[in-house]
């Protein structure tokens, strides 16, 4: 259950290799994943240069002329990869004020091959990136970062499993070969002189639970004076998640909430833009498209029940998880995912997914 937390814990992953620190780490992690759903990790093992290369290239990338950004527009891509301009996305019924480049693990488009016919439509979410030709080295830097975060994600999942008293590799069978990442820029919101931050703040991204992955590993790529990210506690309070250099913010996505029968909650969060421009890089660990609801909910239920984790008071909450995947009419994670993508990028839906477009748009 997401508790009434007032701060987000910082968990030092280097304790994992200390014989005395490991038990401490696992107990801190267990509390963070079952009671908060949001945490920072420090000493995470991703080389500093891999991170600084990415952070340094963001202002250069976003300073590209409009024409260069439009050449890699997301609407060209059946895989929903590429550039989206400010205002292209809506969350919680309002327009988000951010621009972004979306990339993923580089994969061939197997759906489009003759031998791929008959594959489900969601397989088409996998495919090649659209790489802008400038700045130089962008592709190398992003690919290196994806590689490191993929490995971090795997190491982290082992620890989470252990913290829940499960075998270390419990969550691996749910993973996809594709992980997605966004390079995001929130423009500074206009700030009339003398007015306070609250009245000039705008929706960078509205309140949401992450729907596109398993776990999210977020790099806040701006200095600590730049605020914006907030997580919602059980009392309805928005708790600041300030920039802490050297850390990633880690939070639970909806599929993980489903697989853990609601024991680990996907915590609602948002970004409120202020007077300073802000950059961030969320990395969404991918979930296997053919994961069914029955498998997602059933695999661990007996295990959790036998460990006494699904007590009667909690089980109802666990079974009523607020997840589009469970509530929707589609049986696989891949279909639920494709539907979400088409509904937020309708031009891509019309252009590449004509066979399901009408059904996905009108099925609420
Ligand atoms: O930019 C951030 O700090 C958070 C972004 C986010 O929550 C998202 O893209 O899902
Ligand atoms: Fe998010």
Image: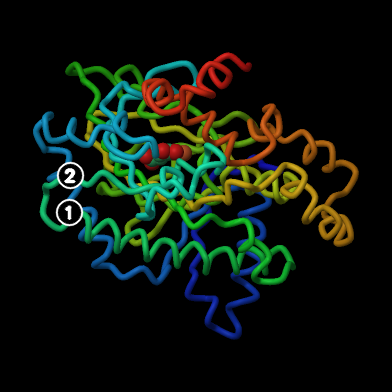
Reply above or below: 17 against 48. below
Disc 2 packing (10 Å; few <14; some 14–19; many ≥20): many
Assign the C terminus to one quadrant of the image. Answer: top right
Front position in the image: 232 or 85: 85
Distance Cα–Cα, label 2 vs label 1: 16 Å
**Quick one: SS at disc 1?**
helix
The quarter of the picture where residue 125 lies is top left
Tell me, for residue 189, which label it has, or none.
none
Mark 2–mark 1 CB contact (< 8 Å): no
- Tell me which numbered mark, 2 or 1, is placed earlier along the sequence: 1
Q: Nearer the viewer, mark 2 or mark 1?
A: 2
Q: Residue beneath label 2, please?
A: 132
Determine whether, in the image, residue 13 is placed left or right of residue 288. left
Residue 189 at x, y percent in the picture: 24, 24
Q: Residue beneath label 1, please?
A: 56
Q: How many marks?
A: 2
Assign the N terminus to one quadrant of the image. Answer: top right
Residue 219 at x, y percent in the picture: 36, 51
The colour scheme applied to this rendered structure is rainbow
Residue 329 at x, y percent in the picture: 69, 27
The quarter of the picture where residue 78 lies is top left
Q: Residue at x 87, y 55 (%)?
A: 305
């Amino acid at each position: 259950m997401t508790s009434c937390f007032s701060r987000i814990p910082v968990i030092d992953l280097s304790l994992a290799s200390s014989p005395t620190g490991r038990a401490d780490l696992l107990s801190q992690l267990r509390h963070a994943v079952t009671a908060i759903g949001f945490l920072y990790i420090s000493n995470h093992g991703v080389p500093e240069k891999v991170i600084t290369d990415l952070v340094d290239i963001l202002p250069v990338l976003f300073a590209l002329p409009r024409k260069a950004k439009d050449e890699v527009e997301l609407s060209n891509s059946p895989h929903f990869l590429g550039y989206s301009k400010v205002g292209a996305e809506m969350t919680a019924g309002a327009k988000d004020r951010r621009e972004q480049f979306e990339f993923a693990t580089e994969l061939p488009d197997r759906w489009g091959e003759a031998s791929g016919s008959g594959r489900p439509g969601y397989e088409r979410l996998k495919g090649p990136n659209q790489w802008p030709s400038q700045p130089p080295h962008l592709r190398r830097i992003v690919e290196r970062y994806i590689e490191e975060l993929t490995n971090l994600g795997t190491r982290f999942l082992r620890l989470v499993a252990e913290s829940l008293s499960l075998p270390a590799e419990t969550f691996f069978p749910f993973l996809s070969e594709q992980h997605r990442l966004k390079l995001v820029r929130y423009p500074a919101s206009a700030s009339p002189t003398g007015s306070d931050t609250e009245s000039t703040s705008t929706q960078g991204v509205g309140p949401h639970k992450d729907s596109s992955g398993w776990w999210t590993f977020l790099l806040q790529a701006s200095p600590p004076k730049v605020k914006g990210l907030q997580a919602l506690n059980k009392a309805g309070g928005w708790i600041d998640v300030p920039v802490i250099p050297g850390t990633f913010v880690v939070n639970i996505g909806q599929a993980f909430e489903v697989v853990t029968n609601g024991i680990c909650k996907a915590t609602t969060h948002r970004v409120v833009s202020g007077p300073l421009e802000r950059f961030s890089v969320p990395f969404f660990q991918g979930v296997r498209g053919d994961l069914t609801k029955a498998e997602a909910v059933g695999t661990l239920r007996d295990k959790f029940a036998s460990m006494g984790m699904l007590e009667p008071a909690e089980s109802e909450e666990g079974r009523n998880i607020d997840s589009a995947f469970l509530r929707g009419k589609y049986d696989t994670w891949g279909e639920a995912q494709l539907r979400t993508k088409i509904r937020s990028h309708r031009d891509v839906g019309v252009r590449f997914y004509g066979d399901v477009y009408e059904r996905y748009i009108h099925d609420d």
